[in-house]
């Protein structure tokens, strides 16, 4: 792939952040954290609580939590690795906020996820359907140590 590359990620516990940094280091990409304007507390992330913030957000398919700060000069990027933990079988709503914030036409989006037990397929299909003007590369669940080699292979290094 040609042009500048960005690794954009949301990480609630640090797991996705570690993988995103590996990908950025391996590819020479810029790194951007999708940070919520209102940070999540431990109570917010309690998926067993039916009234926790994360549960309520995920129940509302139209929910778009505010992001703390935008990407500087998004048009300069041709390829965006997009990382997130899998929540309720899909990407967290703040990732939808990110995707909805930019014109992704012609950009190659490469999703990657971390998860304790869910796959990436449902999230990938959902994002592709909602953002058809982007070029979607096949995503990957990256819980192990193969992020470097996979990312280099994706960009053709």
Image (cartoon, rainbow, N blue to C red):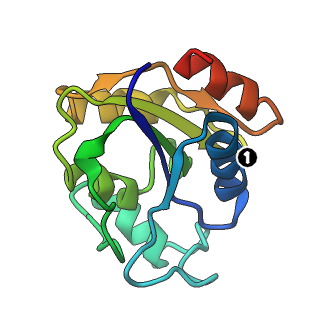
Give the quadrant of the C terminus: top right
Q: Is residue 31 left or right of residue 53?
A: right
Vertical arrangement, residue 87 with respect to residue 156, above or below: below
Instruction: Residue 51: give x, y in percent of width and height.
Output: 45, 78
Q: Residue at x 70, y 64 (%)?
A: 14
* Residue 86: x %, y % from top left: 56, 47
Who's the residue at 49% across and 72% down the image? 50
Residue sitting at 63 percent across and 48 percent down?
A: 20
Label 1: state its secondary structure.
Answer: loop
Decide if residue 11 is on the left or right side of residue 108: right
* Label 1 sits on residue: 116
Residue 8 in the image, given as x and y percentages of width and height: 47, 51
Instruction: Examine the rendered structure and indicate whether residue 105 appears above or below residue 98.
Output: above
* Viewer-nearest residue: 33 or 60: 33
Instruction: Identify the image quadrant of residue 66.
Output: bottom left
The quarter of the image holding the N terminus is top left
Along the line of sight, which residue is nearer the eye, 14 or 126?
Answer: 14
């Amino acid at each position: 792939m040609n042009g500048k590359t960005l690794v954009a990620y949301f990480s609630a516990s640090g797991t996705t952040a570690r993988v995103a940094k590996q990908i950025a280091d391996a590819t020479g990409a810029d790194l951007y954290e999708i940070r919520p304007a209102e940070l999540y507390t431990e109570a917010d992330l309690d998926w067993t609580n039916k009234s926790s913030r994360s549960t309520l957000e995920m129940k509302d398919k139209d929910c778009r939590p505010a992001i703390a700060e935008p990407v500087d000069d998004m048009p300069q990027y041709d390829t965006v690795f997009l990382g997130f933990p899998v929540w309720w079988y899909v990407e967290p709503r703040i990732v939808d906020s990110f995707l909805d914030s930019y014109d992704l036409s012609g950009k190659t989006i490469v999703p990657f996820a971390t998860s304790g037990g869910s796959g990436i397929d449902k999230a990938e299909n959902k994002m592709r359907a909602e953002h058809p003007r982007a070029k979607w590369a096949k995503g990957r669940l990256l819980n192990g140590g193969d992020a470097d080699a996979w990312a280099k292979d994706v960009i053709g290094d």
